[in-house]
Amino acid sequence: MKEIVIISGKGGTGKTSITAAFAYLAKGSVVLADCDVDASDLHLLLKPEIKRSENFYSSQVAVIDGVACTSCGACYDVCHFDAIIPGTPYKIDLISCEGCGYCEKVCPEKAITMKANLDGQWFISTTRLGSHLAHARLGIGAENSGKLVSVVKNVAKQLAQMLKLDTILIDGPPGISCPVISTLSGATFAVIVTEPTVSGLHDLKRVYEIARRFRVGTGVIINKADINKNNYNKIREFIDIQGIKHLADLPYDTTFTKAMTEGKTIIEYTPDNIISRTLANIWPQILRLTENTKKQ
Ligand code: SF4
Ligand code: SF4
């Protein structure tokens, strides 16, 4: 099973537009996974029709039985998160509760129980491009986005096995925190999308370091490659020294954004555009690059 991740060390590099363009080129030959569970927007372009929806529980919160509570204050004394509100009976501030379970242990009346907290939902959908999509929505203020990414990836793998497909195309989260680590873990190849800015180079280095540690093959697309020659040269120097595959340069072009606002991939919107032609050329290259590094 091959896992191709489109990733960027920061948001706003065009990562999702590029993923959608590859999804258009791949049609139904891949399973798609949107691992940007905090702020997913691949669905805006793919217009998924949800076929299955499941709740995601990963954390716990304390719940006080108001009848059994004698207002002794023992729970209040041990809570390090100011999550217990004194009163008759005592109550829990669900936003502040970290689910440590300390209060449950000290309550003399056994009035406190730990309950699973709804942290989000995950979905299996069909898309207008003929591919299946595994995606999710993290609840507001919910944590454990790395765990939810793992769920999305596992669902995508099961879908691929069921559909007898050997490639999963993943829209990765921005940044370098838990969800990114979870996305890159077990991946076959990472397409890192960057842009020639100071922060672009900085974030490229950080996300590349994670990919390198996981022994994930890497290639770089430099989006808006023509906006700053000096920064562009620094990126090229970095990827040449590290031996990262330079996949393509894409020029700055507002068509990318226009296509997005029309709800289309750039290839559908303007097939003859230089960006469309470049992406159409490199998708088969990426597939070839992953051929020798298939993971089971
Ligand atoms: S420890 Fe138990 S009985 Fe005491 S205030 Fe807390 S919930 Fe109520
Ligand atoms: S579970 Fe932990 S954080 Fe939550 S109210 Fe009890 S002691 Fe506080």
Image (cartoon, helix red, strand yellow):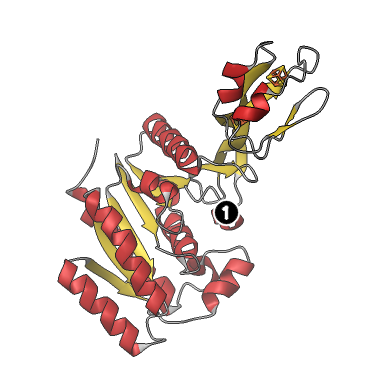
Left or right: residue 23 versus residue 112 is left
Q: What is the x, y in percent for residue 116?
A: 60, 25
Q: What is the x, y in percent for residue 129?
A: 52, 51
Q: What is the x, y in percent for residue 219?
A: 27, 63
Q: Is residue 60 above or below residue 4?
A: above
How many numbered marks appear? 1
Residue 294 in view of the camera? yes
Q: Name the quadrant where ligand 2 sits.
A: top right
Task: Residue at 26% x, 59% y: name it.
Answer: 218
Residue 133 in view of the camera? no
Task: Residue at 64% x, 16% y: name it.
Answer: 107
Task: Residue at 69% x, 35% y: name it.
Answer: 94
Q: List the single residue furthest toward the right.
A: 88
Instruction: Name the residue carrying label 1.
Output: 39
Q: Is residue 59 above or below residue 194?
A: above
Quadrant in which residue 243 is drawn = bottom left
Task: Residue at 35% x, 71% y: name it.
Answer: 202
Where is the C terminus found, in terms of image quarters?
A: top left
Q: Is mark 1 within 8 Å of ligand 2?
A: no
Left or right: residue 12 versus residue 30 is right
Looking at the image, which is closer to me, 82 or 190? 82
Q: What is the x, y in percent for residue 34?
A: 49, 48
Label 1: few (<14), some or many (≥20) within 10 Å? few
Left or right: residue 163 versus residue 97 is left
Of helix, strand and loop, which one carries label 1? loop
Where is the N terminus found, in terms of image quarters?
A: top left
Report the amino acid beneath label 1.
Ala
Quadrant in which residue 194 is drawn = bottom left
Q: List the single residue furthest toward the bottom.
A: 229
